[in-house]
Image (spheres, helix red, strand yellow):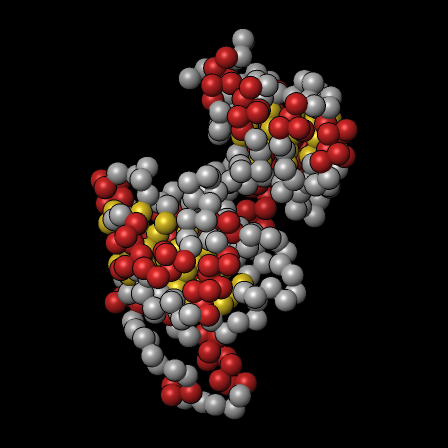
Amino acid sequence: MKVIITDHPFPSLDLAKAIFDKNGIEMEALQTRDPEVIMKQTRKADGIISGMARIDQKVIDNLEQCKVAVRLGVGFDTIDVPAATTRGIMVVNIPDFCTEEVSDHAMALILMISRRVIQGQKAVREGKWGPMAIDFTSFKRMSEQTLGLYGLGRIARGAAEKAKGFKMNCIAFDPFVTREGMAMSGVKKVEMKELLARSDYISLHSPLTKETENAFGIEEFRAMKRTAWIINTSRGPVIRESDLISALDQNLIAGAALDVLTKEPPDKNHPLVNRDNVIVTPHMASWTWDSRDDLQTKSAEEVVRALKGERPKNVVNPEVFSSLKGGKNRS
């Protein structure tokens, strides 16, 4: 049996190789996003692990014996799930990866904004000193501010728990989570209109789907407080970037803190880079030594389960497993 890793962010694949060697599985890493190369090299693969490479219908239709495609991360929008399902290929993601890291990063961005860290550093570099060196407009205690969460999955719940530690009020919009479920996390369920109107910070934590793509456009920015900031550690296309730029130009919102963009990496002259009211980090929210090792280990273990006929822990299309003859641990 053979697994192909199309692309990955790891300095080495020693952890995955050890797991595959132990289970008699050959591993090959391509380090490419080129669909033609991927098609050629994965034709006979029994399993695929992909990072940012797109595993679209053309790639999937070219596979002759693949049983599982694992996405290195929480999101799986880079894999054509319907096409994989039609071909009887299980699609697997790693939803419990980087929960602490991304929720930490979202809160770090909020703290930087709330406590005016960047403005304070800039003032010192300009020779200014003392609390009056920065603009105190809308400078409020965190305990008097409201964090609005767009989506309330694992990461958002982690962010809410940390925000509650700063005594922030937390509200969330997520049509898939009940009012009672949110209350268990100390979060009040609201509709989108109320989320936009009440939040001092709106932190995005949704997957990228047809419903969430461009969910935040000019109308949403107009409905937000002019002192509010939008925080995105989820997926770039959840925000319509052209509308965000317009909103910032028109002072409809105070600013944005972004770890993800629609096109990555951005061009050097990207209009969201080098603005005083925009913080951009290089898609680093998920990354620590711990999360990196977790991701490599868990993805390899999921491939092993699938190739042994066992059910992976996180199957996006479980109907495929249910239809397989001889599958173990059925549920």
Q: Is residue 304 above or below residue 205?
A: above
Q: Nearer the viewer, residue 21 or 180?
A: 180
Q: Nearer the viewer, residue 137 or 31?
A: 137
Q: In which quadrant of the rendered image does the N terminus lie?
A: top right
Q: Is residue 225 above or below residue 37?
A: below
- 326 to the left or right of 108: right
Image quadrant where residue 331 sits:
top left
Position in image of residue 184 (x %, y %) = 25, 43
Image point 53% across, 37% down: which residue? 76
Position in image of residue 296 (x %, y %) = 61, 39
Position in image of residue 122 (x %, y %) = 51, 81
Q: Is residue 102 above or below residue 227?
A: above
Image quadrant where residue 69 sits:
top right
Q: Is residue 49 above or below residue 213?
A: above
Image point 50% across, 12% down: which residue? 323
Extreme-top residue of the structure: 325
- 277 to the left or right of 220: right
Image point 75% across, 34% down: which residue? 36
